[in-house]
Image (cartoon, helix red, strand yellow):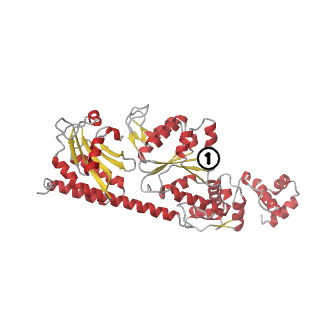
Amino acid sequence: MSQFDSIDLKELEALHALTEKMASLEDDQEILRTVLKHFVIQIGAEVGAFIYYDRQSDSFDIRIIESTLPVHDEAKYFSQTVFRKILETRRAHLSFDTGTDEERPQSKSIVINQIHAILAFPLIINDQVYGIMYFDSRHSRQKFTEESRQLLAFFAPIASLTLARALSGKEIRRENALLKSRLPGEKLPDIIGESAAIKQVTRLVHKVAPTDASVLILGENGVGKDLVARAIHRLSKRRHKPYMAQFVGNLPATILESELFGYKKGAFTGANSDKMGIFEAVDGGTLFLDEISELSFDLQSKLLRVLQNKEIKRLGENTIRRIDVRIIAATNRDLKQMIAEGRFREDLYYRLNVISLTVPPLRERRDDIPLLAEHILKKLSGEEERRLSAGAIKKLMVYNWPGNVRQLENVLQRAHIVSEEETIREEDILLDDAGETMDGTMEELKNRLIRQRLEQFNGNKTLAAKSLDISLRSLQMKARELGL
């Protein structure tokens, strides 16, 4: 008689459906959560958990919990005795907390949590116990039976094989991403440029993207820090999960806190219903916090707890919620100076700055300006073909761009509107004097100044000549020479 003869047809059909669902999943965490949810219902458990076994430290780590009750997520609150038993026997285990269980005395965790019955089975990969699927009942021991143990024993090898496949695929994808990061000329989504400075950013992004490390992006306003953050997400293993950007600057601390953490109905005036916060909404994905330097000191402390413990509490609620979110932060400020001034937490800085990445200003990547301008103009023009004249490109190249790429977009949008011809000319490019550089020959600087003054006085040569302290005739001759 087989040890699995007590498994009936209905249970086998349910296992078949579960196995098919698992086979369609690639993520190991999703597979484990699917198994936990299934058996919490199937065997009538109140708590289901996946416990990872770390062979190097000989310790247990609670990775996933599916429960109908509020429970702790630390290994010390679960039965270490049961875990050790499974490590020793490598078999599905059933035990009870009453005096009739002669196998062992009651453990402290079982007494504290009033656990009536426990079912668990090992996940064995490469002939090693990878982890334990654990279930317990805290209302009644009657739900767990020997037939339930046999069901889990029957399913354990199937679950182990499916998980091994997912972990192997995950490792292959990680190695592929690593290999891609080493390919010369690899580009980033939405990042335009071929300069040495932007290639350095590209190399760093490809290195950090496959990891789960927090990233701090530094750079002036308008350089495209948000595009770099999005590129990191798109190249990461979280790319199929949510990505969200939250601007921190100029938002009142109370509003920002409710947006990030969510709130419980009645937590404050106007909280008419429960609301999920951004951290929960982006669980499994990436959250980009722009201008992190503007975060209030109180919110800095709360963000630090999120990074350390991977858990949050909604406003007005005591329930702890586990989250798995990668944080990418950005700032244009000197955080070390802010730390010295007591305006930014040093411990938070080091949590955020696991890897730092500086996006160069546009003036340090002038070679990219023609490519950027062409890309921006294509987006503005659509099917309509618009191009820049050689003079217009030269004018863009010598400008200092205090507002960086964002300012370049604004300037080209204005030129696109102002110009009535297919080719955007030099005079269609209207720039702020504050951004002019001293690059070029003396003659080029003179010509540039004449153009600026004529633009300033709307083509009135008399006023322009007076402001330049030259004769009207001299200005007229120069304007004719420049084709103005």
Relative to 425, say whether 291 is above or below: above
Say which quarter of the image contains residue 170.
Answer: bottom left
- Left or right: residue 37 versus residue 269 is left
- List x then y, in percent, for residue 196: 64, 62
The answer to whether any part of residue 71 appears in the image is no
Label 1 crowd (10 A; few <14 / some 14-19 / many >=20): some
- List x then y, in percent, for residue 432: 71, 53
Task: Return the residue nearer the eye: 278 or 219.
Answer: 219
- Residue drawn where x is 77% and y is 53% of the image: 457
- List x then y, in percent, for residue 115: 24, 37
The answer to whether any part of residue 239 appears in the image is yes
- Residue drawn where x is 48% and y is 37% of the image: 302
- Where disc 1 sits, the SS reads loop
The N terminus: image quadrant = bottom left
Relative to 15, say whether 275 is above or below: above
Q: Which residue is mark 1?
A: 332
Task: Return the residue nearer the eye: 185 or 56.
Answer: 56
Task: Return the residue nearer the eye: 367 or 24.
Answer: 24
- Left or right: residue 162 versus residue 184 is left
Say which quarter of the image contains residue 44.
Answer: top left
- List x then y, in percent, for residue 38: 25, 50
Task: Return the residue nearer the eye: 123 or 390.
Answer: 123
The C terminus: image quadrant = bottom right
Residue farthest left in this picture: 1
Label total for image: 1
Q: What residue type is disc 1 on?
A: Asn
